[in-house]
């Protein structure tokens, strides 16, 4: 009887929901502007945790891979650069995907009208609130302390550490000096060393700690013409899914392993509630693989907490970073992100150069001038501007998370593209040796002249932006206008408060109305003097909430790419099973992409030959 009642009740709720959905759906799709901008209709909300988990393309939800695979289809179908994506559950909603650069500029430059849709970032508060997860006054407080950490001295430190780390890698892992000239280094998947580079650079530039190359995982490396005296360093334990060992304590994990686990399985931390994760041993007992992954994720987060806590305690006790003594120049000494953050925190956002970040102006200003600014100072002074240890940890965590994979994958795609396009690689090599003749190592002062390396990086970011969609929402009932790129007709769309927008970075970057031959790899677009469309390039977002680590990532990527191309000629590894493929097939294979935490190359097999 009770079961029958429950069934009847359930069915009743379902019918009410279905009828209500149908009415709402008909009303929405009956609107002329929705019909004109119509994109996909899916069951679940387009930007949701469900879509993060269900990544395959389906009509169930607009998974992340849809955003990748449908780069331009929606816009081509409607003829407009804005696409209205409708979802049905729990209620009918519309989200606007924007590939119109003028509209995306309007959105990014008006933070109060179109704030960041931070609900989707709640989960990134595991270690504390931080600059990515907050909006409004709270975000301003974080920005004021965090922005000065990315100082010019830190950029120099990034450069110096990158040179040091990559040179050590050549000597200790690729055994540059010990390998005869005709020996080639064969890399099964270049994503692995590129991730190892950027993690080490990030840890060095964030904490002043140089992680040793000793015991790094080198299972992806071999030599095509090995001489007997060459011995690779011993391999560290690999942590692929095939490895089913269970880590018993967070202290057992090295920082590399922690990041490898977090990159692979962050989504488990996002979707499994904490109490379940704490009891993963028994809760997931019947699911061996899932159980082991859940335990590893928990340990990795505990390990990272311990790692960061130890550094905070050491710094609080006056222990400073020591490894910068190993660097070629000492101009960046003591300017690691963490030291800068603590300094800015102590000095109300000011660094020792007397500059302070004004979150409302969005620029550095003189600290004394800032204090004399009436209302703005009042807001800042009233807020409790000092970050607690928990907030410091939350922000450092976000620097590590935001700066690791993004840059690693950019460098990986750049090398893949250069391996495929040998003529572009040769142009780049000639350019680098013109800046650094006679085998000289490039210095930080050479950076502004390494324009072609920067152009290669930018073109890579255009084609493979790590962050492919940036969520925003409307703060009020308002309207927006978009212009048809072909007919120039203008369409004004009324929107309700809370309406979701996705700045569709891929849609903008492949927009043929702004980029000539957009699928072609052509670094010349970004060379000085060429007039590329600034508003149609959004890899770091734009406006007040754009990437804080932009310069960090540029300095690091230009240094890594320049050094690799200066020392090695790179090509795609020949593999028997792909002997008969065309260039287009090879390109598709080598640049094959999945969407994990960021856009991720699937497997990039490369061969590096030492240059004379
Ligand atoms: C190629 C490398 C990188 C790319 C493509 C990239 C991209 C982005 C994007 C698109 C955003 C805006 C996200 C949003 O609004 O939802 C962002 C924000 C941010 N990024 Fe990056 N990033 C990169 C490297 C880095 C690095 C190296 C760091 C730090 C070491 C970093 C730290 C941050 C921080 C702190 C924010 C939040 C800024 C705010 O909300 O005010 N990023 N990044």
Image (tube, rainbow, N blue to C red):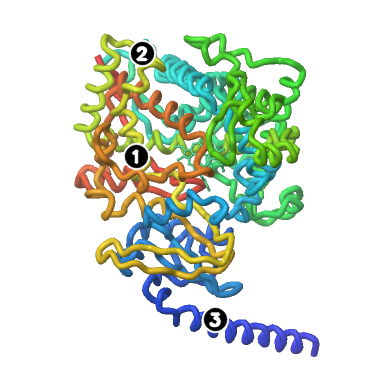
Label 2 CA crowd tier, 10 Å (few <14, some 14–19, many 20+): some
Q: Position of residue 484 (x, y in %)?
A: 31, 64
Question: Residue shown at 39%/76% (left/top)?
Answer: 35
For image coordinates 55% across by 61% down, the residue present is 474
Q: Which mark is residue 460?
A: 1
Mark 3 or 2, closer to the camera:
3
Q: Please tell me whether mark 1 or mark 3 is closer to you in this view.
A: 3
Q: In the figure, is residue 317 to the left or right of 14?
A: right
Does 511 appear above or below 404? below
* In the displayed structure image, the side of residue 18 where residue 129 appears, left or right: right
Residue under circle 3? Answer: 24
Left or right: residue 559 versus residue 250 is left
Q: Position of residue 278 (x, y in %)?
A: 75, 48
Q: Earlier in the sequence, mark 1 or mark 3?
A: 3
The C terminus lies in quadrant: top left
State the separation of the CA atoms marked 3 and 2. 64 Å
Q: Where is 354 relative to 597, above or below?
A: above
Judge by depth and name the residue closer to the eye, 183 or 385: 385
Where does label 2 land, which residue? Answer: 441
* Tag 3 near tag 2, CB within 8 Å: no
Confirm whether residue 17 shows in the render. yes
Give the class, few, some or many, for how many residues have Cα within 10 Å of label 3's Cα (few <14, many ≥20): some
List x then y, in percent, for residue 520. Answer: 24, 45
Q: Nearer the viewer, residue 208 or 543?
A: 543
Q: Cβ–Cβ below 8 Å for labels 1 and 3?
A: no
Q: Quadrant of residue 449?
A: top left
> Alpha carbon of mark 1 to alpha carbon of mark 2: how far?
24 Å
């Amino acid at each position: 009887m009770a079961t029958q009642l429950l069934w009847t009740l359930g069915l009743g709720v379902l019918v009410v929901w279905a009828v209500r959905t149908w009415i709402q759906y008909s009303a929405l799709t009956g609107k002329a502007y929705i019909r004109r901008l119509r994109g996909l209709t899916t069951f679940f909300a387009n930007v949701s945790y469900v879509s993060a988990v269900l990544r395959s393309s389906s009509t169930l939800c607009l998974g992340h891979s849809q955003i990748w695979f449908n780069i331009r289809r929606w816009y081509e179908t409607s003829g407009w650069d804005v696409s209205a994506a409708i979802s049905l559950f729990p209620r009918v909603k519309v989200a606007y995907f924007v590939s119109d650069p003028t509209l995306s500029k309007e959105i990014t430059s008006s933070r109060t009208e179109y704030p960041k849709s931070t609900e989707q970032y709640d989960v990134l508060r595991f270690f504390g609130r931080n600059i990515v997860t907050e909006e409004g006054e709270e975000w301003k407080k974080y920005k004021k302390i965090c922005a000065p950490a990315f100082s010019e001295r830190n950029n120099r430190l990034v450069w110096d550490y990158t040179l040091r780390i990559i040179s050590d890698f050549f000597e200790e892992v690729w055994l540059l000096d010990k390998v005869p000239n005709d020996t080639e280094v064969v890399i099964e998947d270049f994503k692995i060393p590129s991730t190892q580079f950027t993690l080490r650079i990030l840890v060095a530039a964030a904490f002043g700690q140089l992680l040793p190359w000793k015991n790094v995982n080198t299972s992806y490396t071999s030599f095509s013409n090995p001489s007997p005296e060459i011995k690779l360093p011993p391999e560290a334990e690999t942590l692929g899914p095939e490895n089913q060992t269970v880590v018993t304590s967070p202290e057992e994990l090295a920082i590399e392993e922690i990041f490898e686990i977090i990159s692979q399985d962050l989504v488990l931390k996002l979707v499994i509630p904490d109490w379940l994760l704490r009891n993963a041993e028994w809760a997931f007992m019947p699911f061996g693989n899932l159980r082991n992954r859940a335990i590893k994720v928990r340990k990795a987060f505990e390990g990272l907490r311990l790692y960061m806590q130890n550094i905070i305690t050491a710094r609080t006790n006056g222990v400073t970073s020591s490894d910068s003594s190993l660097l070629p120049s000492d101009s960046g000494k003591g300017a690691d992100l963490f030291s800068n953050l603590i300094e800015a925190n102590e000095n109300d956002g000011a660094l020792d150069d007397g500059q302070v970040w004004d979150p409302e102006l969005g620029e550095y200003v003189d600290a004394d001038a800032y204090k004399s600014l009436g209302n703005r100072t009042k807001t800042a002074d009233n807020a409790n501007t000092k970050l607690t240890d928990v907030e410091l940890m939350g922000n450092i965590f976000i620097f590590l998370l935001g700066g690791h994979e993004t840059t690693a994958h950019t460098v990986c795609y750049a090398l893949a593209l250069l391996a495929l396009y040998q003529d572009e690689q040769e142009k780049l090599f000639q350019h680098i040796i013109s800046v650094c003749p006679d085998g000289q190592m490039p210095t930080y002062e050479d950076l502004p002249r390494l324009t072609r390396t920067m152009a290669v990086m930018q073109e890579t970011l255009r084609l493979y932006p790590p962050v492919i969609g940036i969520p925003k929402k409307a703060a009020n009932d308002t309207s927006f206008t978009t212009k048809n790129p072909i007919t120039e007709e203008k369409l004004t769309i009324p929107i309700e408060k809370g309406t979701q927008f996705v700045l569709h970075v891929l849609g903008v970057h492949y927009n043929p109305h702004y980029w000539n031959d957009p699928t072609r790899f052509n670094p010349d677009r970004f060379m000085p003097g060429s007039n590329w469309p600034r508003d149609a390039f959004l890899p770091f977002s734009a406006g007040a909430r754009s990437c804080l680590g932009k310069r960090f990532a540029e300095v690091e990527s230009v240094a890594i790419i320049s050094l690799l191309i200066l020392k090695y000629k790179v090509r795609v590894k020949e593999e028997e099973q792909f002997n008969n493929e065309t260039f287009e097939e090879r390109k598709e294979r080598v640049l094959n992409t999945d969407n994990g935490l960021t856009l991720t190359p699937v497997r990039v097999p490369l061969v590096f030959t030492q240059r004379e």
